[in-house]
């Protein structure tokens, strides 16, 4: 099992690569109360950003309202997926390596209540270094 994102990849190293949005300054912590329904079809690229462990990474920012139930998935036929959700305040990060989503599809998934509203970062990552390829990430939220 992969250890914590912050254990393997210190915040300073990630911030230094410009991957995290600035946590300083004004942010709308309440966010919009509208449900979220985002789909990202993208790729981890060999020319893209890397984490400290050598794995490729791509970040998608989604505004999530406080208290909403969030479901996020990351699937790929090209690499072993690893999904992270980082809240605007940097606390209580969520992460997942593997979950069965259907009989034939495997990927990573998260299911949680957003303890803080604002711009969350949903991170598409591979479990091991040097894996790349296309993926599909979905992020949905609804007011419980």
Image: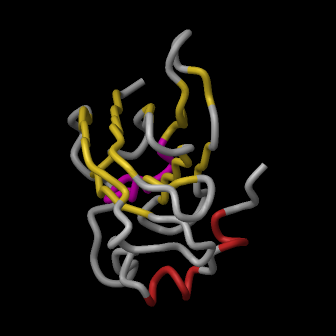
Magenta residues, start to end = 114-123
> Quick check: 78 left or right of 35?
right
Q: Out of 13 and 144, give the one closest to the viewer.
A: 13
Q: Residue 33, how many percent across, how many down?
A: 24, 39
Residue 49's spot in the image, x, y percent? Answer: 39, 74
Quarter where residue 4 is shown: bottom right
- Front residue of 139/88: it is 139
Task: Assess whether residue 118 is covered by the magenta stretch.
Answer: yes
Q: Is residue 72 left or right of residue 109?
A: left
Question: What x and y, as percent, mark residue 52?
Answer: 59, 78
At horizontal 37% and vertical 57% (from top left) the residue drawn is 44
**Does 129 sit above or below residue 117?**
below
Q: Answer yes or no: is residue 113 visible.
A: yes
Is residue 53 highlighted in magenta?
no
> In the image, what residue occupies the spot 21% across and 35% down?
34
Judged left or right of residue 17, residue 27 is: left
**Viewer-proximal residue, 98 or 80?**
80
Q: Is residue 47 above or below residue 137?
A: below
Relative to 144, say whether 139 is above or below.
Answer: below
The answer to whether 120 appears left or right of 3 in the picture is left
Instruction: Pick the quarter of the image with the C terminus.
Output: top left
Q: Is residue 75 visible?
A: no
Q: Is residue 111 above or below residue 8?
A: above
Identified at 40% across, 78% down, the residue is 23
């Amino acid at each position: 099992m992969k250890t914590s994102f912050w254990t393997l990849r210190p915040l300073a190293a990630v911030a230094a690569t410009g991957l995290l949005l600035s946590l300083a300054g004004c942010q709308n912590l309440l966010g919009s109360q509208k449900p979220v329904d985002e789909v990202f079809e993208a790729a981890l690229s060999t020319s893209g950003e890397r984490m400290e462990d050598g794995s490729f990474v791509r970040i998608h920012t989604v505004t999530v309202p406080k208290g909403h139930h969030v479901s996020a998935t990351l699937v790929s036929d090209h690499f072993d997926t690893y999904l992270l959700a980082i809240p605007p305040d940097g606390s209580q990060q969520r992460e997942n390596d593997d979950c069965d989503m259907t009989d034939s599809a495997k990927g990573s998934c998260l299911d949680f209540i957003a303890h803080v509203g604002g711009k969350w970062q949903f991170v598409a990552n591979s479990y091991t270094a040097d894996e790349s390829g296309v993926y599909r990430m979905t992020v949905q939220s609804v007011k419980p």
